[in-house]
Amino acid sequence: MAISLKSPEQIKQMRHAGQLVRQALERCRAICQPGVTTAEIDAEAGKIIAENPGSVGLFKWYPTYHEGEGFPAFTCISVNDEVVHGIPGPRVIQDGDLVSVDFGVRINGWCGDSATTIMVGSVKPEHKKLCAATEYVLQLAIDNIRPGRKWSQVARLMQRHAEDLGLGVIRDFVGHGIGETMHQDPKVPNFVSRELLRNDIDLEPGLVLAVEPMCTLGTDQVRTLDDGWTVVTMDGKPAAHYEHTIAVTETGCEVLTGP
């Protein structure tokens, strides 16, 4: 792995990008109501890019960034049993939906990436518990990231909490390093695997990670729809997805996409 540590000035630039991402997700949350289409939510995030000269959406036309090729929207919007990479479009949000919105931006050469799951209207109690538990899994990571630890120690806490509650922990998609580009080394799983133990990650100041637990109310098995992007649970049960860009500091960590 070619892991690069970021300087305080570089992390400052990433904080700027992270705050644009936070603002975009706040706008998406504000308009995510029954009757609104996922395309309208995506357009709201796109306004952040239009309002900030020099900023570039990390998802639009990924991975080639040639217009008309790759992912066709500013955000990934995944509803209910869609785990990640849902394509915004004419789908109308309904009361009770779980709507995961993932957004990233680059400005001044540095990136920020974050996701949240929005509970729309009258959500079933078990779906509320799923969202609360998945968000807490991310908070567990934030609370336990500090210099001198290895990532497997944090991942074990995340996995244990989710599985103790009977949730599925998605294994096909993991977090990642982030910096000048959206995806950098290392891979950052939300669970402990043989691969992670063989190639564990030392948490040290300047390391910046996009940590993104994804949990389900059922199986951890997923499949990709015919659109080539949207990933859904194999059993049709709902999923939740939360993500922050997090910098390891001398004393702990800083959430660059947080308030």
Image (tube, grey):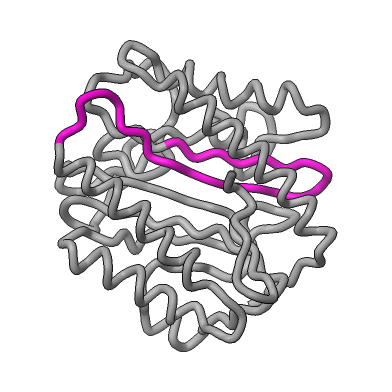
User: Residue 205 appears in which quarter of the rendering?
Assistant: bottom right
Residue 103 is situated, as x and y percent measured from the top left of the image, at 55, 38
Q: Which residues are magenta?
A: 101-124
In the image, residue 211 sits, relative to residue 241, either above or below, namely below
Residue 178 is left or right of residue 176, and the answer is: right
Q: Pick whichever, 25 or 140, lies toward us.
A: 140
Verify whether residue 82 appears in magenta: no
Residue 226, percent across and down? 33, 36
Reply above or below: 44 against 10. Answer: above
Image point (57%, 37%), residue name: 70
Can residue 232 be seen at all in this image of the molecule?
yes
Quarter placement of the N terminus? bottom right
Decide whether residue 105 is among the magenta residues.
Answer: yes
Q: Residue at x 83, y 44 (%)?
A: 108
Residue 221 lies, in percent from the top left, at 23, 57
Q: Which secondary structure type mostly characterizes the magenta part of the structure?
A: strand
Left or right: residue 7 compared with residue 164: right
Q: Quadrant of the C terminus?
A: top right
Closer to the camera in the image, 130 or 46: 130
- Percent position of residue 62, x then y: 60, 41
Above or below, 193 relative to 82: below
Q: Nearer the viewer, residue 234 or 31?
A: 31
Q: In this picture, is 90 found above or below 153? A: above
Residue occupying the point 15% across, 47% down: 235
Side of 47 relative to 180 (left or right): left
Residue at figure coordinates x 53%, y 30% from the top left: 26
